[in-house]
Amino acid sequence: MKPKREREKSDFASVSQDGVVADSDPKRHKPIPPSASENPLLPGFNYGDEDEDDESLRPPPPRNGHTGTPNGNGVQQEENEDDDDDDEFPVDQFKRSRDIEVRRDCPYLDTVNRQVLDFDFERFCSVSLSNLNVYACLVCGKYYQGRGKKSHAYTHSLEAGHHVYINLRTEKVYCLPDGYEISDPSLDDIRHVLNPRFTEEQVEKLDKTKQWSRALDGSDYLPGMVGLNNIKETDFVNVTIQSLMRVTPLRNFFLIPKNYQHCKSPLVHRFGELTRKIWHARNFKGQVSPHEFLQAVMKASKKRFRIGAQSDPVEFMSWLLNTLHSDLRSSKKNSSIIHECFQGELEVVKEIPNKTIAEKKENDDDLDGPSKPTDGVTENNGVITETYRMPFLMLGLDLPPPPLFQDVMEKNIIPQVPLFNILKKFDGEMVTEVVRPRIARMRYQVTRLPQYIILHMRRFTKNNFFVEKNPTLVNFPVKNLELKDYIPLPTPKENERFRSKYDLIANVVHDGKPGEGSYRVFVQRKSEELWYEMQDLHVSETLPQMVALSEAYMQIYEQQQ
């Protein structure tokens, strides 16, 4: 009997060059599997993807025909320029390098199922909930993390037999568990759905093309006129987005990511992504889910607007435009595409009775609150008049109160009012009484018209007990709203054309009771000048006369060029 240690020594024998263990027992000849660094088809053991890493982190290729020898850690080492000793080279100085084989032919490409692919949702691994190195399985549509041997995607490929995966960030397609990259032009349509792209020529032609697109299920849809999924009481977001998609300069700006690549705000990038998906002509389905955009909104607004809680589209529009502007503006100039489209200017004349000011002084309150650019303050007969200019992104219009009593037929008459009557608030003569922050009489006059004007009818009034809705119908023109006939406008500069005619491009309507109900929007398709009614996923063509009969809540008008 040999001692135990000697028996162990005799079991370990030298390895020949062909990878076979030479043993005293000829029956026990086994091939040794090559290490991960020698076999390009075997993936490494980490979750990360070496193809995503910075090229500078990789070791330099061997020069002068020298081939690196694998050390015990599976790291291939090359000759160093400084003639350092290879054995003392630290292993963690550079990441494990692995040459990934690129193949054009993959036997599993016919298993790709485009019907189940949906890239609208957050890019998180369905097992670990991590958002690093996430891959989509192109067979079942689920998201998994990593590509290495211990990763969830690798495990899924073995358990379910699903072999084709796309990296959601780099858009490279891999076959697992074999680990090679697939280079096949038949997968380009999936890359286009994952990340829609537009050239400047395509963007310019968007309003001229009348072509319909076909989804995978055979249904037809119009690019730019796709329904938005209502995740849970998010119709106020959907109508706002559909309205803003009709603003051509804003849409064109967000269709090309190069315009806002300097911006670090996730909200801006998610809005741009959503814009590209809505106008993309090669979608797999005829609707888009604004899930990622809503997550960015919840985070940026600190849950002021969130999934599952109904909000006001006017408040949301105001918040969104201001947030996008503050995220997009650069340090050099204070302007952004938002202000170029929507910003106008008002002249405000504020008359405050002197008695109110005396009361304020007694209470040691701050008189003016936040300081405003005052042009002049005059006092006359105990009334202080303050004049200043302020920018605006939207104009609020007050509706006349509805009648309190029923008519002879014992039915409430729904009153009607022309838009021009309620626009008189901005003629510089009509006085508006305000109570907060203190009693004052205000007069407003428009001094600069924006390219796109947003009007909002104040339908909801809140008292101590409940919210009331004013059902008054506003009669407005769908085309050729001539503002200069109703409100005094500033005289144009020399060599400048005076533009005061506007056309309606979007009209948001509220149906139902205040605090409940739902929102829908009428929008115009410019290429054919047709009107469409959109409510979440439902998109239907409608007549321009139907637009004018609705209870308008918010409108966007475009200046005629």
Image (spheres, rainbow, N blue to C red):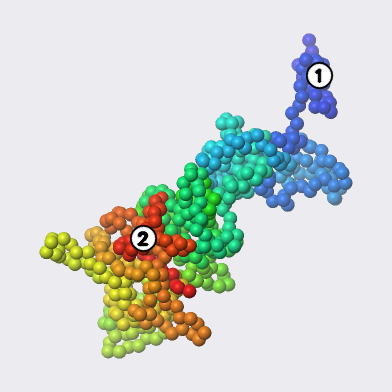
Residue farthest to the left, as pictured: 408
Query: Disc 1 to disc 2, how far (Cα)?
Result: 89 Å
Q: Residue at x 38, y 80 (%)?
A: 484
Residue tagged 1: 23
Residue 66 in percent (x, y) is at 86, 43
Q: Is residue 491 visible?
A: yes
- Using a 10 Å C-alpha cutoff, classify the residue at mark 2 as few (fewer than 14 neighbours), some (14 to 19) or many (20 or more): few
Q: Can residue 271 be seen in this view?
A: no
- Tag on residue 543? 2
Q: Is residue 322 or residue 440 the one in the foreground?
A: 322
| Residue 437 sits above or below residue 35 on the image | below
Q: Where is residue 306 in the image (x, y as percent from the top left)?
A: 40, 53
In this picture, residue 30 sits left or right of residue 242:
right
Image spot of residue 467 (x, y percent): 26, 60
The residue shown at (50%, 48%) is 214
Quarter holding residue 86: top right
Instruction: Depth check: give the residue in front, 10 or 273.
Output: 273
Q: Quadrant of the N terminus?
A: top right
Q: What's the amino acid at mark 2?
A: Leu
Check the image and report above or below for 275 versus 493.
Answer: above
Q: Say whether disc 1 or disc 2 marks the residue closer to the N-terminus.
A: 1
Left or right: where 23 falls relative to 526 = right
Label count reads 2
